[in-house]
Amino acid sequence: RPQNAFFLYRSERRADIIAKHGVVRNQDVSRVAGQLWKNEPEHVRSQYVAMARANYQEHFERNPDFVWMP
C-alpha cells in the first residue's frame, strides 16, 4: 500500500527527529513528526502530497488488481 504524504514526511525526517528530540519509540517519533508537519509551510506540505500522488499512481500501475482491506 502506498504511503500518504505524512508518512513520507515522517520517514524522511525520522533520523532528524531522533537526533534532535532524543526520542526512540515510534509513537514518540510520530507525535513529534505530527507537530512538525502541522507547522510546515504549505509549499513544503504540497511537495509531499505530490510525492504521495506519484507513489499512489505508480503503485496502482504496478499492481492493477490491488485491493486494500483493513
Image (cartoon, rainbow, N blue to C red):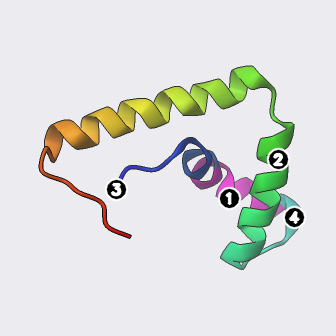
Q: Earlier in the sequence, mark 1 or mark 2?
A: 1
- Going by the numbered disc 3, the residue's amino acid type is Arg
Left or right side of 38 for 10: left
Q: Position of residue 27 (x, y in %)?
A: 72, 75
Along the polypeptide, which appears first: circle 2 or circle 3?
3
The crowding category of the residue bearing disc 1, from other C-alpha atoms within 10 Å (few below 14, some 14 to 19, many at least 20), is some
Which label's residue is closer to the chain start, 4 or 3?
A: 3
Q: Earlier in the sequence, mark 4 or mark 2?
A: 4
Q: Which residues are magenta?
A: 10-19
Residue 69: quarter of image: bottom left
Q: Quadrant of residue 68?
A: bottom left
Q: Position of residue 30 (x, y in %)?
A: 71, 64
Between the C-alphas of marks 1 and 3, the distance is 23 Å
- CA separation, marks 4 and 3? 29 Å
**Helix, strand or loop at mark 1:** helix
- Helix, strand or loop at label 2? It is helix
Q: Residue at x 15, y 47 (%)?
A: 63
Of the numbered discs 1 and 4, the one sitting upstream in the chain is 1
Alpha-carbon span between mark 2 and mark 3: 24 Å
For residue 60: magenta?
no
Q: Residue at x 67, y 74 (%)?
A: 26
Residue reaching furthest to the bottom: 25
Which mark's residue is nearer the viewer, 1 or 3?
Answer: 3
* Residue located farthest toward the top when viewing the structure as drawn: 43
Q: Which mark is residue 1?
A: 3
* Residue appearing at x 68%, y 31% in the figure: 45
Viewer-nearest of discs 2 and 3 = 3
Residue 11 belongs to magenta span: yes
| Numbered tag placed on residue 21 in the rendering | 4
Name the residue carrying label 2.
Answer: 36
